[in-house]
Each structure stands twice: as structure tokens, then as C-alpha cells.
């Protein structure tokens, strides 16, 4: 049943996070044609503050070179967000390696060692 009040099934920040992830991913594909340090980055998620002033973009891995390239292209990424959304303000983007990916890799390594010990 649709809500007449216009409320959505999930919070606004979740929708904004998804939109930002898609826009930034697409823009990184374009930028990687010109900057090879951006070529192997995968956006795993975005966490936008509730006031939409800040957004942390998470990547599967983030080398020093890739981090520097992202900082260099931050303005272009924010411009792409601004052009493709109807947000009152464009969040300031920051970039981090996804800690969940690192934890998953650590668990996989433990399981691998356990399996090797069992053999």
C-alpha cells in the first residue's frame, strides 16, 4: 500500500548514499581513461552525514597513489554529483578504504590457514 504522505520505505540518506555511489563510480570510470591510478578502484559504499554536508566514499582498497589521485580529482567528482542530483548542497567528499573489506580478507586468511593446518 502506498503512503499518501510521501514517506519512503528507507531514509533519505540511504537514497543519497546510493545515488552518490552510482555517480562517483561512473565518473571514476571516465576519469580512469586519463589517470591510471583510478583504474582499479571499486566504490563499496558511501556514508553521508544526516545534514548532507559530508560524505565518506569507501573503496575496496586505497593505495597512496589512488588516494592522491582522488584528492586531485575531488572537485570534478563533486561537480559531477552537483550536476546529476537535485541536492540543496553538494556534500564534501572524503575517501577511505573500506574497513569491512580488510576484515573480510583477514577472516579469509584465518580460514585458509585453518584449512591448510587440517590438511
Image (cartoon, helix red, strand yellow):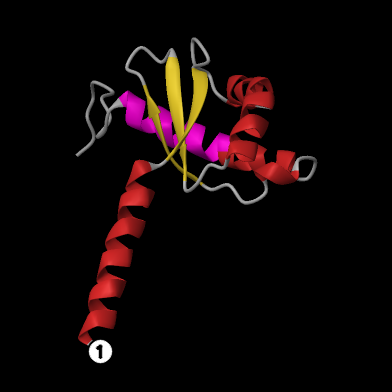
Where does the image place residue 72, in percent across and percent down from the top left?
69, 25
Most foreground residue, 8 or 70: 70
Residue at left 33%, top 47%? 100
Q: Quadrant of the C terminus?
A: bottom left
Left or right: residue 12 versus residue 80 is: left
Residue 73 is drawn in which quadrant? top right
- 32 up-or-down from 52: above or below: below
Left or right: residue 51 versus residue 96 is: left
- Say whether residue 41 is magenta: no
Left or right: residue 68 versus residue 101 is: right
**What are the residue bounds of the magenta stretch?**
12-24
Residue at left 51%, top 16%? 92
| Residue furthest out toward the front | 117
Where does the image place residue 105, in percent across and percent down from the top left?
36, 58
- 34 up-or-down from 68: above or below: below
| Residue furthest out toward the right | 34
Most foreground residue, 68 or 53: 68
- Tell me how many marks there are: 1
Residue at left 50%, top 10%? 89
- Say whether residue 23 is magenta: yes
Residue 76 is drawn in which quadrant? top right
Residue that carries the numbered disc 1 in the rendered image: 119
Residue 68 is drawn in which quadrant? top right
Where disc 1 sits, the SS reads: loop
Query: Secondary structure of the magenta portion, mostly?
Result: helix
Most foreground residue, 8 or 44: 44
Q: Residues within 10 Å of mark 1 (few under 14, many from 20)?
A: few
Q: Quadrant of the N terminus?
A: top left
Residue at left 55%, top 23%? 85
Amino acid at each position: 500500500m502506498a503512503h499518501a504522505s510521501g514517506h519512503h520505505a528507507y531514509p533519505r540518506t540511504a537514497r543519497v548514499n546510493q545515488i552518490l555511489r552510482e555517480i562517483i563510480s561512473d565518473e571514476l570510470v571516465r576519469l580512469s581513461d586519463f589517470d591510471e591510478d583510478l583504474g582499479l578502484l571499486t566504490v563499496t559504499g558511501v556514508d553521508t552525514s544526516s545534514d548532507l554536508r559530508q560524505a565518506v566514499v569507501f573503496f575496496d582498497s586505497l593505495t597512496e597513489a589512488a588516494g592522491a589521485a582522488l584528492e586531485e580529482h575531488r572537485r570534478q567528482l563533486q561537480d559531477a554529483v552537483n550536476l546529476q542530483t537535485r541536492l540543496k548542497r553538494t556534500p564534501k567528499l572524503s575517501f577511505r578504504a573500506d574497513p569491512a573489506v580488510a576484515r573480510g580478507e583477514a577472516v579469509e586468511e584465518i580460514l585458509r590457514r585453518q584449512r591448510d593446518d587440517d590438511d
